[in-house]
Image (cartoon, rainbow, N blue to C red):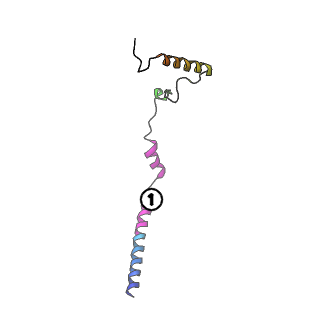
């Protein structure tokens, strides 16, 4: 009988707590204007770009070199020239005369 009374008191206490909490949440959520909150947080921080900043700046990286296209024969000739120049260099073990 005492256990049943404790369970009933606990259930009533939980019910009262949740009803008070829900009432506070309802009052709080009625005052929220989500559209204005969104605009205030995200849209107003954006600054307008000047005309100079709007121009596209092309950067040259190792993945997009300034050469967009190279002829195959021209490339092979350049590689062969480079190889021949490298083979003309003396090795580390050769003495200079």
For this rendering, which residue is in front, 28 or 78? Answer: 78
Measuring 45% from the left and 49% from the top, which residue is drawn there?
Answer: 37
Q: How many marks?
A: 1
Q: Which residues are magenta?
A: 20-45
Q: Position of residue 10 (x, y in %)?
A: 39, 77
The percent coordinates of residue 69 (x first, y second) are 59, 23
Give the residue at the far top of this rendering.
97
Quarter in which the C terminus is drawn: top left
Q: Quadrant of the N terminus?
A: bottom left
Q: Which SS type dominates the magenta stretch?
A: helix
- Please tell me how crowded label 1 is: few (under 14), some (14-19), or many (20+) other residues with Cα within 10 Å: few
Above or below: residue 9 compared with residue 75: below
Give the residue at x 42% y 18%: 94
Instruction: Locate residue 28: give its quadrant.
Output: bottom left
Q: Which residue is mark 1?
A: 29
> Percent from the top left, x then y, of residue 55?
50, 27
53 or 35, which lies in front?
Answer: 53
Residue 60 as seen in the image, left or right of residue 93: right
User: Looking at the image, which is closer to me, 41 or 96?
Assistant: 96
Question: Residue 89 vs residue 77: left or right?
Answer: left
User: On screen, 21 above or below 90?
Assistant: below
Coordinates of residue 18 in the picture (x, y in percent): 42, 70
> In the structure shown, which secondary structural element does the residue marked by tag 1 occupy?
helix
The magenta stretch spans residue 40: yes
Q: Residue at x 53, y 28 (%)?
A: 64
Q: Measuring 38% from the left and 82% from the top, which residue is drawn there? A: 6
| Residue 39, magenta (yes or no) | yes
- Residue 90, relative to residue 20: is it above or below? above
């Amino acid at each position: 009988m005492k256990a049943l009374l404790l369970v009933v008191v606990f259930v009533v206490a939980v019910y009262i707590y949740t009803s008070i909490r829900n009432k506070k949440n309802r009052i709080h959520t009625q005052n929220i204007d989500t559209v204005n909150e969104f605009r205030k947080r995200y849209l107003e921080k954006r600054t307008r770009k000047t005309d100079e900043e709007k121009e596209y700046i092309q950067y040259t990286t190792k993945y997009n070199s300034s050469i967009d296209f190279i002829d195959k024969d021209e490339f092979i000739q350049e590689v062969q020239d480079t190889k021949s120049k490298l083979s003309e260099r003396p090795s580390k073990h050769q003495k200079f005369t």
